[in-house]
Image: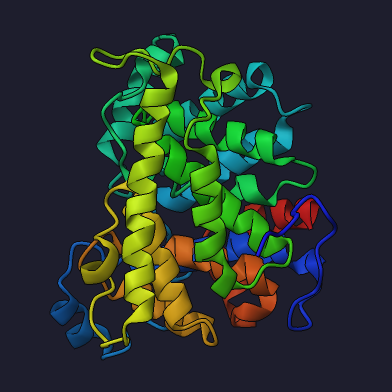
Amino acid sequence: MAIMIEQPARPVGGVPVEQRASGSLFGLAYGDALGKPTEFLTVAEIRRRYGPDGPRELTGQPALVTDDTQMGLAVAWALHQASAATPEILEPLLRDRFLAWAASPDNNRAPGMTCLRACGELARGTRWQEATVAGSKGCGANMRVTPVGLVPGYDLDTLAGVAQLQAGLTHGHPTGLAASELTAYAVRVLRDGASLTEVPALLRQRASGQRSVYRGDWLGDLWQRPGVTDPVEFIARGWDECLAVLDRLDAALAAPDDGGDPCLRTGAGWIAEEALATALLSALWHRDDPVAALGRAATTAGDSDSIAALAGAFLGAERGMSAWPTRWSDQVEYADQLTTLGAAWD
């Protein structure tokens, strides 16, 4: 089923369109906050601490998030500030926001080394295609990309370019670029009325159609690496790895849910394409209970905060703020920024 996402969104399940940007932004932060204390624990340790269903309540005043939400906000504010969506305008805005994050005293949440290394080079004024960590496809490329799918007015080419650019500033691997585009695209189609159950097929359709598309106007000469003969060869590798993880997602969805760690089906989420797939798997297994989906995503032996954050962004884009307990919106860290951005894009 093809969805023309440039068309006005249709309400699904009675969810007004105007609630969905807020639902996705807050969902990202909620999942991040629930997954923060479970990252680096085994599933057995998480269940001993929280019970068999994992964490279900935010803790702390405020409930702290990680670099996932912090960098998601950095991307979101750059997009909000931009007078137009072009690489010439967005690259310096993204650079400035990333460098402000890197220098912030609040950047004390076990930030990813790839982001820190790339920001160190960007701070020296290095051209971003050279500052990026060329071989990294860590999930830092797409944990922060979900706001791209929420910005009103982006056509699909713009969405793809922006998603890949924000990834490429730190993560230069083609799979980081492709997975980031797919993550933003998933948020976009959900915001525009797709059902979560339709998303895996829509992602496969998108990945297959984009396999030979290198966005040189956004990426410049990023593709030029030893042993790579042309830009199509470079980007096709990323799309092929995304298609492979979508195969694993389809297989997991076709099998019964055994109640175990979703990472055993679609990967631990430390790398971009696995974070996308495992977040979708957790969300789809508990589509009718978004809080349960976040708990399941946080009850993983992999990158729990990133998996739960992406699951929250997807479910919030589909269901809006009604997906989440109302009491959480005043408790989560950065609630004021999430509210401002959500209101602007809703």
The image quadrant where one finds the N terminus is bottom right
Front position in the image: 98 or 294: 294
The image quadrant where one finds the C terminus is bottom right
Q: Identify the residue shown where x is 43% and y is 45%.
A: 179
| Image position, residue 214 (x, y; %) | 51, 25
**Quick check: 343 above or below 298?**
above
Q: Identify the residue shown where x is 17% and y is 68%.
A: 41
In which image quadrant can residue 281 be found?
bottom left
In which image quadrant can residue 255 be found?
bottom left
**Quick check: 87 above or below 289?**
above
| Image position, residue 23 (x, y; %) | 65, 67
In which image quadrant can residue 215 be found?
top right
Q: Identify the residue shown where x is 55% and y is 18%.
A: 216
Q: Is residue 297 left or right of residue 21?
A: left
| Image position, residue 53 (x, y; %) | 32, 88
Q: Is residue 188 left or right of residue 308?
A: right
| Image position, residue 130 (x, y; %) | 37, 13
